[in-house]
Image: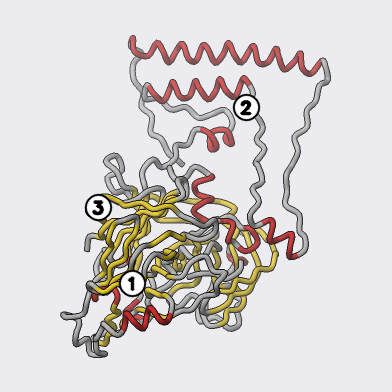
Amino acid sequence: MTTHSQPLHRCGRVVAVGPHYWPVLLAILGLLLVTVLATTQASAAASSMSMSMVGDARQQPGDEHQQQQQLVSHIPIKQRPKSLHEQSQFHTLLALQRHGHFLLAPHRRFQEDNIRAAYTDPLNLPLTNSLPTQSASYYGPVSIGTPPQTFYFDFDTGSSNFWVTSSSCSNCPLTQGYDHKRSSSYRKDGSHFKIQYGIGEVNGYLSRDTVHFNLVALGSNSNNNHHNITVRDIVFGEATSQQAQPARLPAAGLIGLAFKSLAVNSVTPLLDTLFDKKMIPKNVFGMYLSTAVTGDRQGMLTIGGYDSTLFRGPLVYTPIVHDRWYVIKVGQLRVGSHVIVGESSAIVDSGTSCLAGPSDDVNAIMERINIDVDCGGMDTAPNITISIAGHPFTITPKDYTLNMGGQCQVCIQGMNLPKSAPYRWILGDSFMHGFYTVFDKQRNRVGFASAVH
Protein backbone atom coordinates (compact mmCIF):
# COMPACT_ATOMS: atom_id res chain seq x y z
CA MET A 1 0.00 0.00 0.00
CA THR A 2 1.58 3.22 -1.09
CA THR A 3 1.60 6.36 1.01
CA HIS A 4 1.37 9.73 -0.61
CA SER A 5 3.04 11.71 2.24
CA GLN A 6 5.04 11.23 3.75
CA PRO A 7 18.01 -15.11 26.41
CA LEU A 8 19.83 -16.54 24.98
CA HIS A 9 19.81 -19.42 27.61
CA ARG A 10 22.99 -21.50 27.45
CA CYS A 11 23.39 -24.94 29.12
CA GLY A 12 26.94 -25.46 30.40
CA ARG A 13 28.40 -28.76 31.57
CA VAL A 14 30.89 -29.76 34.33
CA VAL A 15 33.89 -31.81 33.23
CA ALA A 16 37.31 -32.78 34.63
CA VAL A 17 40.18 -30.46 33.75
CA GLY A 18 42.27 -31.91 30.92
CA PRO A 19 45.08 -30.56 28.75
CA HIS A 20 42.71 -28.95 26.31
CA TYR A 21 41.39 -26.69 29.05
CA TRP A 22 44.73 -24.92 29.63
CA PRO A 23 43.66 -22.14 27.21
CA VAL A 24 40.64 -21.52 29.42
CA LEU A 25 42.77 -21.25 32.56
CA LEU A 26 45.20 -18.96 30.79
CA ALA A 27 42.31 -16.78 29.64
CA ILE A 28 41.05 -16.45 33.22
CA LEU A 29 44.56 -15.58 34.48
CA GLY A 30 44.75 -12.98 31.74
CA LEU A 31 41.47 -11.49 32.90
CA LEU A 32 42.79 -11.20 36.49
CA LEU A 33 46.00 -9.53 35.33
CA VAL A 34 44.26 -7.02 33.10
CA THR A 35 41.75 -6.25 35.86
CA VAL A 36 44.63 -5.29 38.20
CA LEU A 37 46.15 -3.08 35.49
CA ALA A 38 42.80 -1.45 34.75
CA THR A 39 42.22 -0.73 38.45
CA THR A 40 45.66 0.90 38.70
CA GLN A 41 44.93 3.05 35.66
CA ALA A 42 41.58 4.07 37.07
CA SER A 43 43.19 5.19 40.34
CA ALA A 44 45.72 7.27 38.47
CA ALA A 45 43.00 8.83 36.36
CA ALA A 46 41.01 9.70 39.47
CA SER A 47 43.97 11.47 41.05
CA SER A 48 44.33 13.72 38.01
CA MET A 49 40.63 14.63 38.18
CA SER A 50 40.21 14.36 34.38
CA MET A 51 36.74 14.27 32.90
CA SER A 52 35.22 13.78 29.46
CA MET A 53 31.79 14.70 28.21
CA VAL A 54 29.68 12.82 25.67
CA GLY A 55 27.00 14.75 23.83
CA ASP A 56 23.47 13.63 23.15
CA ALA A 57 22.06 14.05 19.65
CA ARG A 58 18.33 14.54 19.60
CA GLN A 59 15.91 15.61 16.91
CA GLN A 60 14.06 18.78 17.71
CA PRO A 61 10.53 19.60 16.60
CA GLY A 62 10.12 22.27 13.95
CA ASP A 63 7.81 23.55 11.27
CA GLU A 64 6.49 21.47 8.39
CA HIS A 65 9.44 22.26 6.13
CA GLN A 66 11.92 21.30 8.82
CA GLN A 67 10.06 18.07 9.51
CA GLN A 68 10.22 17.22 5.80
CA GLN A 69 13.96 17.74 5.89
CA GLN A 70 14.24 15.50 8.95
CA LEU A 71 12.70 12.66 6.95
CA VAL A 72 15.88 12.31 4.89
CA SER A 73 18.45 13.16 7.58
CA HIS A 74 20.73 10.57 9.17
CA ILE A 75 21.78 11.29 12.76
CA PRO A 76 24.95 9.48 13.88
CA ILE A 77 24.72 7.45 17.07
CA LYS A 78 27.38 8.24 19.63
CA GLN A 79 28.66 5.24 21.57
CA ARG A 80 30.80 5.20 24.70
CA PRO A 81 34.03 3.26 23.97
CA LYS A 82 34.58 0.13 26.07
CA SER A 83 37.17 0.32 28.83
CA LEU A 84 40.23 -1.95 28.92
CA HIS A 85 38.55 -4.00 31.64
CA GLU A 86 35.38 -4.48 29.56
CA GLN A 87 37.39 -5.50 26.51
CA SER A 88 39.24 -8.11 28.59
CA GLN A 89 35.94 -9.50 29.89
CA PHE A 90 34.56 -9.78 26.39
CA HIS A 91 37.55 -11.63 24.88
CA THR A 92 37.85 -13.95 27.90
CA LEU A 93 34.21 -14.95 27.61
CA LEU A 94 34.69 -15.67 23.91
CA ALA A 95 37.64 -17.97 24.76
CA LEU A 96 35.50 -19.82 27.31
CA GLN A 97 32.66 -20.25 24.83
CA ARG A 98 34.98 -21.75 22.20
CA HIS A 99 35.84 -24.52 24.71
CA GLY A 100 32.23 -25.29 25.59
CA HIS A 101 31.94 -23.25 28.82
CA PHE A 102 29.63 -20.34 29.46
CA LEU A 103 29.97 -17.92 32.36
CA LEU A 104 27.67 -15.15 33.41
CA ALA A 105 29.17 -11.77 32.68
CA PRO A 106 29.88 -9.68 35.81
CA HIS A 107 27.45 -7.01 34.60
CA ARG A 108 24.01 -8.05 33.32
CA ARG A 109 23.73 -5.19 30.85
CA PHE A 110 27.15 -5.98 29.37
CA GLN A 111 26.09 -9.60 28.89
CA GLU A 112 22.84 -8.73 27.14
CA ASP A 113 24.35 -6.17 24.79
CA ASN A 114 27.54 -7.96 23.79
CA ILE A 115 27.42 -11.70 24.53
CA ARG A 116 23.99 -12.77 23.38
CA ALA A 117 24.32 -14.23 19.92
CA ALA A 118 22.25 -12.83 17.09
CA TYR A 119 20.11 -15.14 14.96
CA THR A 120 22.48 -16.13 12.20
CA ASP A 121 19.79 -17.72 10.02
CA PRO A 122 16.74 -16.12 8.45
CA LEU A 123 13.45 -16.35 10.32
CA ASN A 124 10.03 -17.15 8.88
CA LEU A 125 6.67 -15.69 9.81
CA PRO A 126 3.78 -17.57 8.13
CA LEU A 127 1.12 -15.40 6.51
CA THR A 128 -2.54 -16.14 5.83
CA ASN A 129 -4.38 -15.31 2.63
CA SER A 130 -7.44 -13.30 3.58
CA LEU A 131 -9.30 -13.92 0.30
CA PRO A 132 -11.92 -16.18 1.95
CA THR A 133 -12.93 -13.13 4.03
CA GLN A 134 -13.42 -11.12 0.82
CA SER A 135 -10.21 -9.14 1.40
CA ALA A 136 -7.28 -9.48 -1.01
CA SER A 137 -4.37 -9.24 1.42
CA TYR A 138 -2.01 -11.35 3.55
CA TYR A 139 -1.70 -11.07 7.31
CA GLY A 140 0.47 -12.50 10.10
CA PRO A 141 0.49 -12.39 13.93
CA VAL A 142 2.59 -10.02 16.02
CA SER A 143 2.14 -9.34 19.75
CA ILE A 144 2.52 -6.05 21.63
CA GLY A 145 2.89 -5.33 25.35
CA THR A 146 3.38 -7.19 28.64
CA PRO A 147 1.54 -9.49 28.85
CA PRO A 148 1.40 -9.83 25.07
CA GLN A 149 -1.69 -8.72 23.16
CA THR A 150 -1.69 -10.52 19.81
CA PHE A 151 -3.03 -9.01 16.61
CA TYR A 152 -2.87 -9.69 12.89
CA PHE A 153 -1.01 -7.24 10.66
CA ASP A 154 -0.77 -6.59 6.95
CA PHE A 155 2.91 -6.32 5.90
CA ASP A 156 3.21 -3.48 3.42
CA THR A 157 6.25 -2.76 1.24
CA GLY A 158 4.62 0.46 0.03
CA SER A 159 4.75 2.26 3.39
CA SER A 160 7.10 2.51 6.38
CA ASN A 161 5.07 3.03 9.56
CA PHE A 162 3.95 0.42 12.11
CA TRP A 163 0.55 1.10 13.62
CA VAL A 164 -2.22 -0.82 15.39
CA THR A 165 -5.85 -0.05 16.10
CA SER A 166 -6.19 1.47 19.54
CA SER A 167 -8.80 0.24 22.02
CA SER A 168 -9.97 3.86 22.14
CA CYS A 169 -10.69 4.09 18.40
CA SER A 170 -14.25 5.28 17.80
CA ASN A 171 -14.69 4.38 14.11
CA CYS A 172 -12.40 1.38 13.58
CA PRO A 173 -13.73 -1.98 12.37
CA LEU A 174 -11.77 -3.85 15.05
CA THR A 175 -13.74 -3.61 18.29
CA GLN A 176 -10.96 -4.75 20.63
CA GLY A 177 -7.71 -3.02 19.76
CA TYR A 178 -4.44 -2.57 21.60
CA ASP A 179 -4.98 -1.35 25.18
CA HIS A 180 -1.82 0.21 26.59
CA LYS A 181 -3.41 0.33 30.05
CA ARG A 182 -3.06 -3.47 30.17
CA SER A 183 0.68 -3.40 29.42
CA SER A 184 3.32 -2.95 32.14
CA SER A 185 5.98 -2.23 29.48
CA TYR A 186 4.06 0.63 27.81
CA ARG A 187 5.71 4.04 27.63
CA LYS A 188 3.95 7.17 26.52
CA ASP A 189 5.23 9.11 23.54
CA GLY A 190 2.17 11.16 22.66
CA SER A 191 3.30 12.61 19.32
CA HIS A 192 0.43 12.90 16.84
CA PHE A 193 0.64 11.01 13.55
CA LYS A 194 -1.45 11.05 10.40
CA ILE A 195 -0.88 8.78 7.41
CA GLN A 196 -2.64 9.14 4.07
CA TYR A 197 -2.83 5.92 2.04
CA GLY A 198 -4.16 5.39 -1.45
CA ILE A 199 -7.48 4.08 -0.09
CA GLY A 200 -7.77 5.66 3.33
CA GLU A 201 -6.28 7.56 6.23
CA VAL A 202 -5.34 6.85 9.84
CA ASN A 203 -4.85 9.26 12.72
CA GLY A 204 -3.62 8.77 16.27
CA TYR A 205 -0.59 9.12 18.49
CA LEU A 206 2.74 7.39 18.92
CA SER A 207 3.45 4.96 21.77
CA ARG A 208 6.33 2.76 22.93
CA ASP A 209 6.07 -0.87 24.03
CA THR A 210 7.62 -4.33 23.77
CA VAL A 211 6.95 -6.27 20.56
CA HIS A 212 7.00 -10.09 20.35
CA PHE A 213 7.44 -12.37 17.32
CA ASN A 214 6.95 -16.15 17.15
CA LEU A 215 9.22 -17.13 14.25
CA VAL A 216 10.63 -20.29 12.68
CA ALA A 217 14.40 -20.29 12.16
CA LEU A 218 15.82 -21.71 8.93
CA GLY A 219 19.17 -23.35 8.33
CA SER A 220 20.87 -26.66 9.13
CA ASN A 221 21.55 -25.71 12.76
CA SER A 222 18.05 -24.52 13.61
CA ASN A 223 16.01 -27.73 13.05
CA ASN A 224 13.10 -25.47 12.16
CA ASN A 225 12.62 -24.52 15.81
CA HIS A 226 10.23 -21.83 16.87
CA HIS A 227 11.82 -18.78 18.45
CA ASN A 228 10.06 -16.15 20.52
CA ILE A 229 11.85 -12.87 19.80
CA THR A 230 11.19 -9.94 22.11
CA VAL A 231 12.20 -6.41 21.17
CA ARG A 232 11.81 -3.67 23.76
CA ASP A 233 10.84 -0.02 23.40
CA ILE A 234 9.48 -0.09 19.85
CA VAL A 235 7.83 3.09 18.60
CA PHE A 236 4.53 2.55 16.82
CA GLY A 237 1.27 4.31 16.19
CA GLU A 238 -1.99 3.82 18.05
CA ALA A 239 -4.73 4.57 15.55
CA THR A 240 -7.68 6.35 17.14
CA SER A 241 -9.40 7.12 13.84
CA GLN A 242 -9.57 5.42 10.44
CA GLN A 243 -11.14 6.52 7.19
CA ALA A 244 -11.92 4.00 4.44
CA GLN A 245 -10.17 1.23 6.42
CA PRO A 246 -6.65 1.03 4.94
CA ALA A 247 -6.26 -2.22 6.94
CA ARG A 248 -9.20 -4.58 6.65
CA LEU A 249 -10.30 -7.24 9.12
CA PRO A 250 -8.94 -9.46 10.46
CA ALA A 251 -5.85 -7.19 10.31
CA ALA A 252 -5.62 -4.73 13.21
CA GLY A 253 -3.00 -2.56 11.49
CA LEU A 254 -0.10 -2.30 9.12
CA ILE A 255 3.63 -2.93 9.43
CA GLY A 256 5.42 -0.85 6.84
CA LEU A 257 8.55 -2.36 5.28
CA ALA A 258 9.80 0.50 3.10
CA PHE A 259 12.47 3.08 3.90
CA LYS A 260 12.73 5.38 6.91
CA SER A 261 12.81 8.39 4.60
CA LEU A 262 9.14 7.65 3.84
CA ALA A 263 8.06 7.18 7.46
CA VAL A 264 5.76 9.75 9.02
CA ASN A 265 7.41 11.36 12.09
CA SER A 266 10.72 9.77 10.96
CA VAL A 267 9.93 6.63 12.95
CA THR A 268 12.39 3.80 12.25
CA PRO A 269 10.66 0.90 10.42
CA LEU A 270 10.22 -2.22 12.55
CA LEU A 271 12.52 -4.54 10.58
CA ASP A 272 15.21 -1.86 10.46
CA THR A 273 15.06 -1.77 14.27
CA LEU A 274 15.51 -5.56 14.44
CA PHE A 275 18.62 -5.23 12.29
CA ASP A 276 19.97 -2.26 14.26
CA LYS A 277 19.57 -4.26 17.47
CA LYS A 278 21.41 -7.21 15.85
CA MET A 279 18.39 -9.48 16.17
CA ILE A 280 18.60 -10.50 12.50
CA PRO A 281 21.75 -11.11 10.39
CA LYS A 282 20.89 -8.88 7.42
CA ASN A 283 18.59 -6.00 6.62
CA VAL A 284 16.94 -8.20 4.02
CA PHE A 285 13.52 -9.82 3.83
CA GLY A 286 11.70 -12.07 1.40
CA MET A 287 8.00 -12.33 0.59
CA TYR A 288 6.05 -15.33 -0.70
CA LEU A 289 2.43 -14.68 -1.60
CA SER A 290 0.53 -17.71 -2.89
CA THR A 291 -2.93 -17.91 -4.38
CA ALA A 292 -3.68 -20.84 -2.01
CA VAL A 293 -6.29 -20.14 0.66
CA THR A 294 -5.68 -23.31 2.72
CA GLY A 295 -2.59 -25.15 3.98
CA ASP A 296 0.72 -23.91 5.31
CA ARG A 297 1.93 -22.25 2.12
CA GLN A 298 -0.47 -19.38 1.76
CA GLY A 299 2.23 -16.80 2.39
CA MET A 300 5.54 -16.26 4.15
CA LEU A 301 7.55 -13.29 5.36
CA THR A 302 11.23 -14.21 5.78
CA ILE A 303 13.27 -11.67 7.76
CA GLY A 304 17.06 -11.46 7.87
CA GLY A 305 17.41 -13.12 4.47
CA TYR A 306 15.32 -15.35 2.22
CA ASP A 307 13.93 -18.91 2.11
CA SER A 308 15.35 -20.80 -0.89
CA THR A 309 12.75 -23.59 -0.48
CA LEU A 310 10.07 -21.21 -1.68
CA PHE A 311 11.47 -20.52 -5.15
CA ARG A 312 13.27 -22.28 -7.99
CA GLY A 313 16.00 -21.03 -10.24
CA PRO A 314 18.32 -18.10 -9.59
CA LEU A 315 17.29 -14.78 -8.11
CA VAL A 316 17.39 -11.98 -10.64
CA TYR A 317 18.29 -8.69 -8.99
CA THR A 318 17.64 -5.18 -10.17
CA PRO A 319 18.61 -1.89 -8.49
CA ILE A 320 16.23 0.21 -6.43
CA VAL A 321 16.14 3.61 -8.09
CA HIS A 322 14.37 5.65 -5.40
CA ASP A 323 15.19 6.48 -1.78
CA ARG A 324 11.69 6.02 -0.33
CA TRP A 325 9.97 3.18 -2.18
CA TYR A 326 11.05 -0.06 -3.87
CA VAL A 327 10.98 1.50 -7.33
CA ILE A 328 12.68 -0.39 -10.17
CA LYS A 329 13.10 -0.02 -13.91
CA VAL A 330 11.01 -2.36 -16.06
CA GLY A 331 11.14 -3.14 -19.77
CA GLN A 332 8.40 -4.22 -22.13
CA LEU A 333 5.02 -5.41 -20.87
CA ARG A 334 3.37 -7.96 -23.19
CA VAL A 335 -0.01 -9.69 -23.20
CA GLY A 336 0.65 -12.93 -25.01
CA SER A 337 2.89 -11.79 -27.86
CA HIS A 338 1.44 -8.29 -28.09
CA VAL A 339 3.57 -5.46 -26.70
CA ILE A 340 1.49 -3.04 -24.63
CA VAL A 341 4.16 -0.63 -23.39
CA GLY A 342 7.94 -0.18 -23.51
CA GLU A 343 10.37 0.77 -20.80
CA SER A 344 8.92 2.32 -17.66
CA SER A 345 9.26 2.33 -13.86
CA ALA A 346 7.33 0.39 -11.22
CA ILE A 347 6.98 0.08 -7.47
CA VAL A 348 6.96 -3.40 -5.91
CA ASP A 349 4.12 -3.06 -3.41
CA SER A 350 2.72 -5.91 -1.32
CA GLY A 351 0.09 -3.51 0.03
CA THR A 352 -1.61 -3.25 -3.37
CA SER A 353 -3.70 -6.26 -4.37
CA CYS A 354 -3.58 -5.82 -8.13
CA LEU A 355 -1.32 -5.01 -11.01
CA ALA A 356 -1.93 -1.33 -11.71
CA GLY A 357 -0.83 1.08 -14.40
CA PRO A 358 -1.90 3.94 -16.67
CA SER A 359 -5.54 3.65 -17.70
CA ASP A 360 -4.93 3.57 -21.47
CA ASP A 361 -2.38 0.77 -21.14
CA VAL A 362 -4.61 -1.20 -18.78
CA ASN A 363 -7.53 -0.84 -21.20
CA ALA A 364 -5.31 -2.31 -23.94
CA ILE A 365 -4.51 -5.22 -21.64
CA MET A 366 -8.12 -5.86 -20.69
CA GLU A 367 -9.21 -5.92 -24.33
CA ARG A 368 -7.19 -9.13 -24.71
CA ILE A 369 -8.45 -10.81 -21.52
CA ASN A 370 -11.92 -12.38 -21.53
CA ILE A 371 -12.59 -13.97 -18.15
CA ASP A 372 -16.20 -14.12 -17.03
CA VAL A 373 -17.50 -13.61 -13.53
CA ASP A 374 -18.16 -17.37 -13.34
CA CYS A 375 -14.46 -17.90 -14.21
CA GLY A 376 -15.17 -18.97 -17.78
CA GLY A 377 -12.26 -18.22 -20.10
CA MET A 378 -9.54 -18.84 -17.53
CA ASP A 379 -8.08 -21.70 -19.58
CA THR A 380 -7.69 -19.60 -22.70
CA ALA A 381 -6.73 -16.24 -21.17
CA PRO A 382 -3.24 -15.00 -22.11
CA ASN A 383 -0.20 -14.71 -19.88
CA ILE A 384 1.27 -11.31 -19.04
CA THR A 385 5.05 -10.89 -19.30
CA ILE A 386 7.09 -8.04 -17.83
CA SER A 387 10.79 -7.64 -18.57
CA ILE A 388 13.01 -6.89 -15.53
CA ALA A 389 16.80 -6.62 -15.76
CA GLY A 390 16.57 -8.17 -19.22
CA HIS A 391 14.71 -11.27 -18.00
CA PRO A 392 11.08 -12.10 -18.77
CA PHE A 393 8.76 -12.57 -15.79
CA THR A 394 5.46 -14.17 -16.76
CA ILE A 395 2.31 -14.26 -14.65
CA THR A 396 -0.61 -16.53 -15.50
CA PRO A 397 -4.36 -15.92 -15.38
CA LYS A 398 -4.39 -17.73 -12.03
CA ASP A 399 -1.96 -15.13 -10.70
CA TYR A 400 -3.81 -12.05 -11.89
CA THR A 401 -7.36 -13.29 -11.21
CA LEU A 402 -9.02 -13.38 -7.79
CA ASN A 403 -11.24 -16.45 -7.35
CA MET A 404 -13.64 -15.79 -4.50
CA GLY A 405 -15.82 -18.85 -4.02
CA GLY A 406 -16.24 -19.53 -7.72
CA GLN A 407 -16.59 -15.91 -8.76
CA CYS A 408 -13.65 -14.40 -10.60
CA GLN A 409 -12.34 -10.88 -10.85
CA VAL A 410 -9.40 -9.84 -13.00
CA CYS A 411 -7.11 -7.92 -10.64
CA ILE A 412 -5.64 -5.39 -13.05
CA GLN A 413 -6.52 -1.76 -12.48
CA GLY A 414 -6.12 1.52 -14.30
CA MET A 415 -4.49 4.24 -12.21
CA ASN A 416 -3.23 7.55 -13.55
CA LEU A 417 -0.60 8.75 -11.10
CA PRO A 418 0.67 12.34 -10.93
CA LYS A 419 3.57 13.15 -13.23
CA SER A 420 5.66 13.84 -10.14
CA ALA A 421 5.31 10.21 -9.00
CA PRO A 422 8.58 8.27 -9.45
CA TYR A 423 6.79 5.27 -10.97
CA ARG A 424 4.04 4.58 -13.49
CA TRP A 425 3.18 0.96 -12.61
CA ILE A 426 2.44 -0.91 -9.38
CA LEU A 427 3.58 -4.54 -9.19
CA GLY A 428 1.17 -5.62 -6.47
CA ASP A 429 0.09 -9.05 -5.23
CA SER A 430 -1.11 -10.06 -8.71
CA PHE A 431 2.51 -9.95 -9.86
CA MET A 432 4.05 -11.24 -6.59
CA HIS A 433 1.84 -14.37 -6.72
CA GLY A 434 4.14 -15.70 -9.41
CA PHE A 435 7.48 -14.66 -7.93
CA TYR A 436 9.29 -14.93 -4.64
CA THR A 437 10.56 -11.42 -3.99
CA VAL A 438 13.66 -10.40 -2.02
CA PHE A 439 13.96 -6.86 -0.69
CA ASP A 440 17.63 -6.15 0.02
CA LYS A 441 18.07 -2.81 1.77
CA GLN A 442 21.77 -3.38 2.39
CA ARG A 443 22.58 -3.61 -1.32
CA ASN A 444 19.71 -1.42 -2.46
CA ARG A 445 18.17 -4.00 -4.77
CA VAL A 446 15.11 -6.20 -5.31
CA GLY A 447 15.37 -9.82 -6.46
CA PHE A 448 12.82 -12.08 -8.16
CA ALA A 449 12.62 -15.84 -8.76
CA SER A 450 9.78 -18.17 -9.78
CA ALA A 451 7.73 -19.07 -6.71
CA VAL A 452 7.16 -22.72 -5.78
CA HIS A 453 3.47 -23.48 -5.28
Q: Earlier in the sequence, mark 3 or mark 2?
A: 2
Seen from the viewer's position, the closer of residues 376 and 124 is 376
Task: Tell me, for residue 430, which label it has, or none.
Answer: 1
Q: Secondary structure at mark 1?
A: helix
Query: What whole-number distance in Å separates the C-alpha atoms at marks 2 and 1?
Result: 51 Å
Please name the residue shown 71% across and 14% down the image: 41
- How far apart marks 3 and 2 lie (CA) works out to 42 Å
Residue 85 place in picture, x, y as percent: 61, 20
Residue ID at (42%, 75%) = 357
Q: Which residue is mark 2?
A: 82
Asked if labels 1 and 3 touch by Cβ distance under 8 angstroms, the answer is no
The amino acid on which the numbered mark 2 sits, given as a three-letter code, is: Lys
Query: Where 49 sits versus 435, above or below?
Result: above
- Say which of 441 and 136 sits in front: 441
Q: Visible in this render: residue 350? A: yes
Residue placed furthest toward the left = 379
Pinpoint residue 90: horizontal percent, then vertical percent.
53, 25
Q: Counting residues from the N terminus, which is met first, the one under dot 3 or under dot 1? A: 3
Looking at the image, which is closer to me, 312 or 393? 393
Q: Are marks 3 and 2 in contact (CB under 8 Å)?
A: no
The circle drawn on residue 309 is 3
Looking at the picture, how far across and down is residue 259, in whole percent? 53, 56
Whether residue 293 can be seen here: no
